[in-house]
Amino acid sequence: MNKISDDHRSRQALVYVRQSTFDQVQNNLESKRRQYSLADRARELGWANIVVIDDDLGHSGSGVHRVGFERLLAALCEGNVGAVFCIEASRLSRNGRDWHTLLEFCRLVNSLIIDEDGVYDARQPNDRLLLGMKGTLSEMELSTFRQRSQAALEQKAKRGELHSTVAIGYIRSNDNRIEMDPNQRICEALALVFRTFRELRSVRQVLMWLRSQHMELPAVSYDSTSRSIVWKLPSYNTILKILTNPVYAGAYVWGRTKTRTRIENGRKRVTPGCRLTQANWEVLIQDHHCGYIEWDEYQANQMMIADNANMKGAMVRGSIKRGSALLAGLLRCGHCGRKLHVTYCGAKSGVVRYNCRGSLINHGSGSCISFGGLRADQLIGREVLAVLQPLGLRAAVSAIDSVAAQTDNRIRQKELSLSQARFEVARARRQYDAVDPENRPVASELERRWNDALGLQSSIEVELAKLQCDRPGALTEVDKNSILELGADLQAVWNDPSSSADIKKQIVRTLLNEVVVTISGNIITMIIHWQGGNHTEQRFTKNLPGQHRWNTDPDIESLVRELARVMSDGAIASLLNRFGKRTAKGLAWTQNRVCVLRNDRRIDVYVEGERKIRGELTLQEAARALKVNEATVYRLIQRKQLPAKQACRGAPWIIR
């Protein structure tokens, strides 16, 4: 004890208290009492000013950020500490760097380290050697413990028997296996998520559909003593976790994440939960238990989710977006390798154009390639229809079956919800009946719970009644025959204006991986990469400047050119409409539209009197000149006794 001087006693005595985990703080009470009792020992050794530092209760001593330990070092640097008390070296640190930093500070300011075994002066070589060995043994002990426990965990995981928690939809059996939850409502809710994703092919679309239908999903709720299942409207993260968890594909997986450690500002920073690629998973056991989906479907779902991720670079297609562009996200420039962008122009933003703007955005140079999307979309559509045509009838039969199945799924979920609500009502009633009526505080609370359960049951009954009321009737034979006819003629369904653009995009993305486009002169070449590895090539001609799809029929243009020499624009429009002729956009002719066509084609307007200059008469004018009626002139024309010509039936006869 001669190492303790009056100078040491005149300064503070710091008692450092630490336990590694919160579980130890709550349950290892004797260790905590031993550490706090060091304050009594400090008093026995003559210290009056004693400070207990217990900020690090529940923190590991392996080098992570510890507020209490930094407070201890700061107090040592001020020179106000005479001794540091701890029950053993492992309480102060399990890390060599922190331990030797503490020893160096104690040596500089002449502070003692006191544990249950003795008093140590860091300035004395023997004590410093002994303290260094204690720190090294403490660090080695922790490493050994970790190595043993990690090896045991890995061994158990390789057998597929390590279950820290069990995913919703499964339970742990008595022999440490996982089995499907016997709760039918939970199983059918999870199956509904996978069926809906199979149809909509987007996590966000699944979320929006479930919330629009007020479909609740199970979620885990933890309290201080137990784990329970609650039902609530899903969030995006809930749907994503269900779709990406391999346990629902019947696989046992361990080691999907790892902890990354790095040095920032001279400190160790630990980032847990960093996801690994599937190839780097430590344990993967397929067909480990009964799954909600097959492993191949799980793999396809992961590829679909990855492809739907926007802002992840040029190697993913991105999610299906609004707009009529059929090939959005699928086109890649064959010259620079960048993805093509989609722009919409025109009066109503209905004209699709594909552009390679990567060089313009990144380097400020010009666009690589650019072309209109109409013929490209039509060409790919024909290619897809050629592949799908043999499957048309099968798709029609599936559509007939799915008409009622979609509503049945919603009704089934509401029926299960109602069954659960009725159970809760009966349970609340039994609890209320079992309480003593005189115990008003308890009876009133149980009565309130009973009323809440009745209110929930009533709301579910209303929703179920509405679904049953809105349920479509069974398809008639006429409806079924119509669907089958459409299945036999997929082209009519594809080209119908009411066909959903989103469904077309989903079909195209299911069949195609990507389309590589190159342009040479005015020839556009598309290399189509099909799912599965096949490749086909298609070519079409790019429009020259001034050309567009709204081209008037050449026969109509020729007719207008002839009629313009004998009729006004208004008369020409009336004649074209009488014969069912339409503009390039399918509109009726007007005087103004005829005028626009003439101006575009440089056709002169009819000037009154120009026929007289050319020496031409109409049938009416010829009748007046011959002083006969019009029928007589018409008979002469029919008998070819009077030469005459007519641009088309209904146009005026011209006689020279």
Image: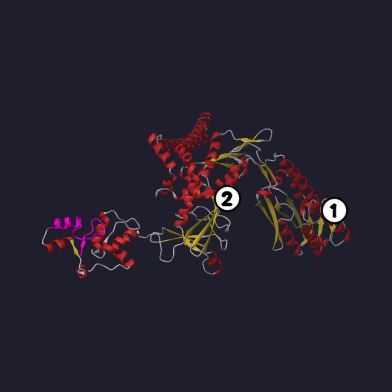
Q: Callout 2: helix, strand or loop?
A: loop
- Residue 354 shows in this picture: yes
Magenta-colored segment: predominant secondary structure: loop
Q: Quadrant of the C terminus?
A: bottom left
Find out whether residue 269 is within the magenta segment: no
Magenta stretch containing residue 631, yes or no?
A: yes
Residue 417 in percent (x, y) is at 50, 36
Q: Which residue is labeled 1 in the image?
A: 118
Residue 192: x, y in percent?
52, 40
| Between 192 and 501, the one nearer to me in the picture | 501
Q: Which residue is mark 2?
A: 534
Q: Nearer the viewer, mark 1 or mark 2?
A: 2
* Horizontal and vertical percent position of residue 366: 52, 69
Q: Quadrant where the N terminus lies?
A: bottom right
**Which residue sits furthest right?**
126
Specify whether 94 is left or right of 485.
Answer: right
Q: CA distance from mark 1 to mark 2?
A: 79 Å
Q: What residue do we see at 74% from left, 61% from top?
A: 73
| Dot 2 crowding, Cα within 10 Å, few <14, some 14–19, many 20+ | few
Total marks shown come to 2
Identify the amino acid type marked 2. Asn
- Magenta range: 629-656
